[in-house]
C-alpha cells in the first residue's frame, strides 16, 4: 500500500479555543481509516484542514508525496481530495442534478454543457451507488436521507483519490447505509483512500481497516481494528471505562392509564393510510421503520406541518386540528425535528437565544430577573447535556455538529411539553451523550410527558420505548412490546417486513 497522506503535529485554535494539539494522522491508499471521538473532539476540524477550509496553525501535511507548505491552504481539488460534509451544502431550490454539478470544475472536467448530460451523469453516479433518486426533483421536496445521498454523489463526481466522509450515515436508514458500505468497498478496491468519521461503533467494525481516536483535540489511539475490542475504543474516546447504557428499563409503573392522544384512521396523501393508535400519559412510544415508511410524516402531521387528508386526533378526549405548529404548541406539543438545520436552529443566533426561544412568554417578569432566570436555565441544560462551548453567547454555527444537535434537544428541556416528539434525536451524538439523552427521555416521561420517539437505531429504540409501532409503506405493521422482543435482529426483521412477530 502507498501512503495517501500524512499529517504530523497538527495544531489549530479558534481564538482562545485550542481545538487540535499535536495531532498525527496517516492514511494509505485502499484503506478505510475511521476517525472517531466525542462531540467537539476536533474530527471535523482536522478534515476541514485537509479539505483546505481551515489552515493549520502548525504541523506538516503531505498528500500523495506532495508536501503542502506550512501556512498554505491544502489545495484539495488539485490533490484529488473530496469531502462529504456533516452539514449539508446543497441549494434547496435547485434540482438534484443541478446540485451535483454546481461547481464549475466538474462542469469543465466532464465538458458538461447542458442539463441533459448533467442528468444522465447524475443518474449514472446514483446507479453506481446502488440507489434510486429522481434527479429532476428539487432538493427541498426531498427527505433528509436523499440530501445525504446527493452530497455523496456530489463528492464522487469529482474523481477523488482521497474521500472524506463526515458522518455520512447520521441520517440514513439501515438499508441505505448498507448501500453506502457496498459503495465504499468498491471505492476501496479502486485504491481510493477513505477517511470515515462516525459515532456508530457497529459500522466502524463493519467497514474500517484502522481507527484513530481524538479526545479533546489530542490523538489517543491509532491501530488496526482487528487488534481492538469495542471497550478499548470506547475507553480511548471517553477516557474511562463505560458500562452498557442500553439496558431496558421497565417503566410500566410510571405510565398512567389515562389516554392522552388518540389517533384514528389518519391518512396523508401518498404517505400514510389509516393509521390508528393510542398514547397514554407518561408513555414512550417508539416508531420503527425504513426511510419512507411514514415515521417522519406522522410526527410532522401531529405537529401541524403536513395537512391531513382524513382522520381524527383527540387530545384528552377532545378533537383537535393540528393545522399549524403554532396551534399545537399551545396544546403543549413539541417536536425535535430530523433536519436541525432547516427546522431546529437559528444558526447565526447565540446558543442562549436558541435555547430560550421556546421559553418566550414563560417569563412574565421583564428585565433583570428574566435574564438571570434564562442564564440559570441555559447553564443547567448545557451541564445536563454536556454541551461543549466556549460561552453561552457564542453563535450556534461555530459549535460542532453533535453539539448543535444537543442544543436542539436542549431547547425543549426548559419547557414541560404534554407531548414531546423526537425524530432521530441521537443522530450524530457521541456514545457518552446518547445514554444521557435516553435518560432524559425517561425522566421527562416519568414526570408525565408522553413521548413519541423516532429512531433508526434499534438498540436505542428497544432500550427506551414502552411500546414500538413498526411502520411500513405508511401503515402500522406491528404494535410491539419491547419486552417480548428477544434481539435486535428480531426487530430488524420486522422492520424489513419479513417476520410475523
Ligand atoms: N469556525 C469555528 N469557530 C470557532 N470554533 C469552532 C469552529 N469550528 C469548530 N470550532 C470548535 O472546535 C471544536 C471542535 O469542533 P469539531 O467540529 O472539529 O468537532 P467534532 O469532533 O467534529 O464533533 P462532532 O462529533 O460533534 O461533529 C468545538 O469546540 C467547536 O466549537
Ligand atoms: Mg463533526
Image: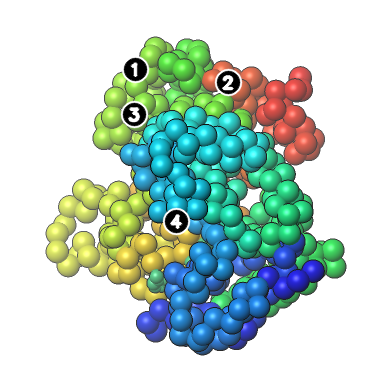
For the point 56% across and 64% down, which residue is it? 81
Q: Name the residue under label 2.
A: 473
Q: What element carries label 3?
A: loop
Quarter holding residue 3 = bottom right
Which is more toward the observer, 143 or 480? 143
* Residue 480 x %, y %: 67, 26
Sooner in the amino-acid sequence: mark 3 or mark 2: 3
Sooner in the amino-acid sequence: mark 3 or mark 1: 3
In the image, residue 289 sits, relative to residue 64, either above or below, namely: above
Sooner in the amino-acid sequence: mark 3 or mark 4: 4
Which is more toward the observer, 381 or 131? 131
Q: Residue 319 carries which label?
A: 1
* Residue 144 x %, y %: 48, 40
Q: Name the residue under label 3.
A: 304
Instruction: Give how far apart the Cα atoms at labels 3 and 2 are.
Output: 21 Å
Q: What element carries label 2?
A: loop
Q: Is mark 4 on a helix, strand or loop?
A: helix
Sooner in the amino-acid sequence: mark 2 or mark 4: 4
Sooner in the amino-acid sequence: mark 1 or mark 4: 4
Quarter holding residue 66 = bottom right
Observer-side mark, 2 or 4, equals 4
Left or right of 168: which side holds 193? right
Which is more toward the observer, 3 or 246? 3
Q: How crowded is mark 3: few (under 14 residues within 10 Å), some or many (20 or more)?
A: some
Q: How crowded is mark 4: few (under 14 residues within 10 Å), some or many (20 or more)?
A: few
Determine whether label 2 and label 4 are within 8 Å by CB. no
Instruction: Give how far apart the Cα atoms at labels 3 and 1 are.
Output: 14 Å
Instruction: Give how far apart the Cα atoms at labels 2 and 4 are.
Output: 40 Å
Observer-side mark, 2 or 1, equals 2
* Residue 264 x %, y %: 46, 14
Amino acid at each position: 500500500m502507498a501512503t495517501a497522506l500524512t499529517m504530523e503535529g497538527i495544531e489549530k485554535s479558534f481564538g482562545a479555543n485550542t481545538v487540535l494539539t499535536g495531532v498525527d494522522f496517516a492514511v494509505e491508499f485502499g484503506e478505510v481509516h475511521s476517525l472517531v471521538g466525542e462531540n467537539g473532539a476536533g474530527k471535523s476540524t482536522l478534515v476541514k484542514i485537509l479539505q483546505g477550509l481551515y489552515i493549520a496553525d502548525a504541523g506538516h501535511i503531505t498528500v500523495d508525496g506532495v508536501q503542502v507548505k506550512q501556512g498554505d491552504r491544502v489545495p484539495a481539488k488539485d490533490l484529488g481530495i473530496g469531502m462529504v460534509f456533516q452539514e449539508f451544502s446543497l441549494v434547496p431550490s435547485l434540482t438534484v442534478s443541478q446540485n451535483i454539478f454546481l461547481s464549475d470544475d466538474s462542469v469543465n472536467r466532464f465538458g458538461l454543457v447542458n442539463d441533459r448530460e448533467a442528468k444522465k451523469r447524475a443518474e449514472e453516479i446514483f446507479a453506481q451507488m446502488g440507489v434510486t433518486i429522481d434527479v429532476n426533483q428539487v432538493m427541498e421536496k426531498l427527505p433528509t436521507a436523499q440530501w445525504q445521498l446527493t452530497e455523496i454523489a456530489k463528492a464522487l463526481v469529482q474523481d477523488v483519490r482521497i474521500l472524506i466522509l463526515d458522518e455520512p450515515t447520521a441520517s440514513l436508514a439501515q438499508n441505505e447505509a448498507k448501500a453506502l458500505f457496498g459503495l465504499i468497498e468498491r471505492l476501496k478496491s479502486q485504491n481510493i483512500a477513505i477517511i470515515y468519521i462516525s459515532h456508530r461503533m457497529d459500522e466502524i467494525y463493519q467497514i474500517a481497516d484502522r481507527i484513530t481516536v481524538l479526545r479533546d483535540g489530542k490523538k489517543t489511539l491509532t491501530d488496526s481494528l482487528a487488534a481492538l475490542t469495542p471497550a478499548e475504543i470506547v475507553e480511548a474516546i471517553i477516557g474511562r471505562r463505560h458500562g452498557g447504557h442500553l439496558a431496558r428499563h421497565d417503566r410500566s409503573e410510571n405510565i398512567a392509564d389515562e389516554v392522552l392522544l388518540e389517533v384514528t384512521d389518519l391518512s396523508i396523501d401518498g404517505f400514510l393510510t389509516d393509521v390508528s393508535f393510542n398514547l397514554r400519559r407518561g408513555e414512550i412510544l417508539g416508531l420503527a421503520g425504513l426511510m419512507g415508511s411514514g415515521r417522519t410524516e406522522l410526527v410532522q402531521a401531529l405537529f401541524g406541518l403536513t395537512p391531513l387528508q382524513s382522520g381524527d386526533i383527540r387530545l384528552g378526549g377532545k378533537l383537535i386540528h393540528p393545522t399549524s405548529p403554532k396551534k399545537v404548541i399551545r396544546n403543549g406539543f413539541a417536536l425535535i425535528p430530523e433536519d436541525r438545520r432547516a427546522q431546529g436552529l437559528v444558526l447565526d443566533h447565540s446558543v442562549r437565544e436558541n435555547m430560550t426561544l421556546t421559553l418566550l412568554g414563560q417569563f412574565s417578569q421583564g428585565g433583570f430577573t428574566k435574564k438571570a432566570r434564562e442564564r440559570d436555565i441555559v447553564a443547567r441544560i448545557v451541564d445536563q447535556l454536556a454541551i461543549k462551548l466556549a460561552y453561552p453567547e457564542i453563535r450556534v454555527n461555530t459549535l460542532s455538529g453533535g453539539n448543535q444537535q444537543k442544543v436542539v434537544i436542549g431547547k425543549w428541556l426548559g419547557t414541560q411539553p404534554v407531548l414531546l416528539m423526537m425524530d432521530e434525536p441521537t443522530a450524530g451524538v457521541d456514545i457518552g451523550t446518547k445514554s444521557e439523552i435516553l435518560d432524559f427521555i425517561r425522566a421527562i416521561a416519568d414526570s408525565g410527558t408522553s413521548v413519541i420517539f423516532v429512531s433508526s437505531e434499534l438498540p436505542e429504540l428497544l432500550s427506551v420505548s414502552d411500546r414500538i409501532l413498526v411502520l411500513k409503506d405508511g401503515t402500522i405493521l406491528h404494535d410491539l412490546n419491547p419486552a417480548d422482543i428477544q434481539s435486535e435482529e428480531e426487530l430488524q426483521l420486522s422492520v424489513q417486513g419479513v417476520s410475523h412477530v
